[in-house]
Structures are given as C-alpha cells and as structure tokens.
Amino acid sequence: MKKVLVLAMCITALFLTACKSQTLTVELEANPTTGYCWSYEMDVQDVLVEQKQEYVEANKDLMGAGGVQRYVFGAKNDGTVVITFTYKRPWEKAQSYTVSQRTFTVKNGEIISGAVVETKVD
C-alpha cells in the first residue's frame, strides 16, 4: 500500500502530519486573484521529484475566494532537501511576501518530515 504524507500550511497556522511515506503533498493557502502565487526552489536536486501541481478553489460559488495550491512530490533518491516556497507577485521586486522552508529526508525510498521555518517579509 502506498503511503502519503500531507503537509498543509496557511499564513497563520501550520498543520503537519508526520509519518513515513513515498509521496509528499504540500498544501499552501493561496488566492491567485490577488496576483500572488507560490513558487519553490530545492537546494538539492534528485531527492524529491514534483509529480503534480494544482490549484483547488475553496468555494467555486464565491468570486475571488481563496483556495489551496497543492504540490505533490515523490521520493527519488536518498538524501535531505530544503524546499523554499515563496508567496509573492512575480512582477514586484521589493514588496511583502511570505517564505516557507521545509526540510525533508528520504531514506530507503520513504520521505521523512523535518523542520519547517516560516517568514513573512514586509
């Protein structure tokens, strides 16, 4: 049976389900109607691989309502990776934005959750 690790983050709270898994799902509160969007960088390549990325609306009946940006990663090779997620308007250079760093370790093909650091820059 395939195990799944789900990590959900919103600006004010972090929910982490810690368990070993082959797949990691990161869910970040988002509202693309504001122009803000999430992007990420990994400090090490070939530890995790992105399998899917999607935006899920919270309420399809409410115009401009936020939702969740969902990223699904799979284990590729053993090692430790820091994923830095940034929430900002891509065309703005020095405006406020949010950074969320998550560290994950892959061992024997299973993802092990690690540290989470969140920063809001104004």
Image (cartoon, rainbow, N blue to C red):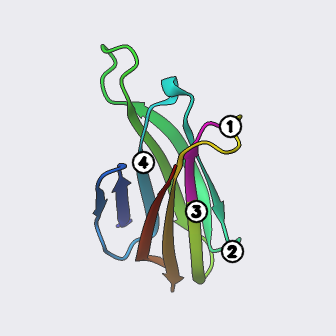
Q: Which corner quadrant of the image does residue 1 belong to?
A: bottom left
Which mark sits nearer the N-terminus, 2 or 4? Answer: 4
Q: Position of residue 115 (x, y in %)?
A: 42, 77
Helix, strand or loop status at disc 4? strand
The residue tagged with tag 1: helix, strand or loop? Answer: loop
| Amino acid type shown at disc 4 | Leu
Vertical relation: 101 (above or below) 38: below
Choose the circle earlier in sequence order: 1 or 2: 2
Q: How many marks?
A: 4
Q: CA distance from mark 1 to mark 2?
A: 27 Å
Lower position in the chain sequence, tag 1 or tag 3: 3
**Residue picked out by circle 4:** 28
Task: Tell me if mark 2 has few (under 14), some (14-19) or many (20+) residues whose alpha carbon lies within 10 angstroms of its own.
Answer: few
Task: Tell me which numbered mark, 3 or 2, is placed earlier along the sequence.
Answer: 2
Q: Write down the quadrant of residue 56 in the picture.
A: top left
Q: Viewer-nearest of labels 1 and 2?
A: 1
- Give me the disc on residue 44: 2
Q: Which residue bears the numbered disc 3? A: 84
**Of callouts 1 and 4, the N-terminal one:** 4
